[in-house]
Image (cartoon, grey):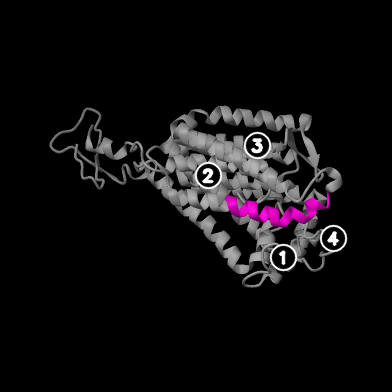
Amino acid sequence: MSRAEETSAPRSGAPIDGILLGALLALTALGAVMVYSASAIPASQSARLGHDEFYYLKRQLLAASVGVGLLVLALRLGARRISALAYPLLGLTFFTLLLVPVLGKTAGGAQRWIPLGPLQFQPAEAAKVALVLYLARSLARKQEKVRIFSIGLLPHLIVTGALVALCLWQSDMGTGVILFLVLFAMLFAAGARVSYLLGAGLLALPVAWHLVKSTPYRYERVMAFLDPERYRYGPGFQLWESLLGTAHGGWLGQGLGQGKGKLFYLPAAHTDFIAAVIAEEAGLLGILLLVSLYAVVVWRGVRAALNASEPFGCYAALGVTSLVGAQALVNLAVVFGLLPTKGLTLPFVSYGGSSLMTLLGAAGVLLAVSAERGGFLRRAPSAVMVRTGGERSRAGEDVRLDTGAEGTTP
């Protein structure tokens, strides 16, 4: 094996990133604690439905167990085998999304869940991970052709648009926003033309505004975002209570279990707005710890992408990292009044079996890539074009000489 091949080949048996694994498990454990704190009293008030104070915690732990199983499975499969499953998983995701109007369960005015025994499966959550794997596989195959509009942008935009349309059919605009953010992040990282991405983004803005303006509850959320105090007894009630709880938390918080917002003041306290409960009970210190854990995940995820030995692993790691980072950023911005209210979970922390299971499965892909050592992105850092000295080839070709760090010569 040549020296260059040794540099690019993945190192077998390399350990996974322990820091990344620790941050992911810490977020999951923090989520379990805060789900119990936010839901214990509301759950105990539903005794007539057969619930007890541990109702939501038990379901969250069950989902976490399944998710850890998916994480271990992804680790055992490895990035190469997962790459072969990318297209079948995308097709399965489309199929389950189409099943929702037929078999789906309605909750909160939206039909998004398919009952699976003790758990409710939300295909839109799986769509996020399926899109990441599809894009990683497609971009890995196209590589330098990604700058061509008809090859690099258009097919990926069509697939993502189809997923977004199915999510909008289920009144889930938040997932659609995340899907487009992941698409643009991965295409940018793969080298797509910035002009194409900017053009697609500008064309999407009037469509997004039409979707907001034509749907009364979405438009009311925007108005409440612009003036929370004015709409605090109407569409801005959730945001206003979130801001109140955050303000009451102060530096160190009211203490675990001592928050007042979750006592039927703050709707969805254990799901979309769980960060407000953390802010009230653990204060600014707790929020800083939460943000630090997400920062570690993003840091180690980018590091795994840089060290990936193959293009699929590189793009998959970037995609999963972008997914977790973007969703956490949007959720926290909503909770603290920086964006209009959207129905998005806080990754690994909010109550929600589908979100937790699929994200832990995606984390398994990220951890599998973190065990690789090869540096796909550093394999050929630069190249120069030189003429062959003293003679010309028949077609007048140039010879490409590698000037990488290894100093290899032809």
Residue 186 in the image: above or below residue 155: below
Residue 292 in the image: above or below residue 141: below
* Residue at mark 4 to residue at mark 2: CA–CA distance: 36 Å
Q: Are marks 3 and 1 in contact (CB under 8 Å)?
A: no
Q: Residue at x 82, y 68 (%)?
A: 230
Q: Are marks 3 and 2 in contact (CB under 8 Å)?
A: no
For disc 3, the neighbor class at 10 Å (few under 14, some 14 to 19, many from 20) is many
| Quarter assignment of residue 221 | bottom right
> SS at mark 2?
helix
Instruction: Give the amino acid type for the residue marked by disc 2 in the picture.
Output: Val
Q: Nearer the viewer, mark 1 or mark 2?
A: 1
For disc 1, the neighbor class at 10 Å (few under 14, some 14 to 19, many from 20) is some
On the question of residue 372 being in view, the answer is yes
First in sequence: mark 3 vs mark 1: 3
**The label number, if any, that marks residue 234 in the structure image:** 4
Q: Give the x, y percent position of residue 206.
A: 69, 49
Residue 116 in the image: above or below residue 267: above
Q: Nearer the viewer, mark 3 or mark 2?
A: 2
Q: Residue at x 65, y 37 (%)?
A: 163
Q: Give the x, y percent position of residue 127.
A: 62, 37
Q: Give the x, y percent position of residue 304.
A: 42, 46
The residue indicated by pointer 1 is 258
First in sequence: mark 3 vs mark 2: 3
First in sequence: mark 4 vs mark 2: 4
* Residue at mark 3 to residue at mark 2: CA–CA distance: 17 Å
**The label number, if any, that marks residue 163 in the structure image:** 3
Q: Nearer the viewer, mark 4 or mark 1?
A: 1
The residue indicated by pointer 2 is 320
> SS at mark 3?
helix
> SS at mark 1?
loop
Quadrant of the snapshot with the C terminus: top left
For the image shown, how many numbered marks are present on the structure?
4
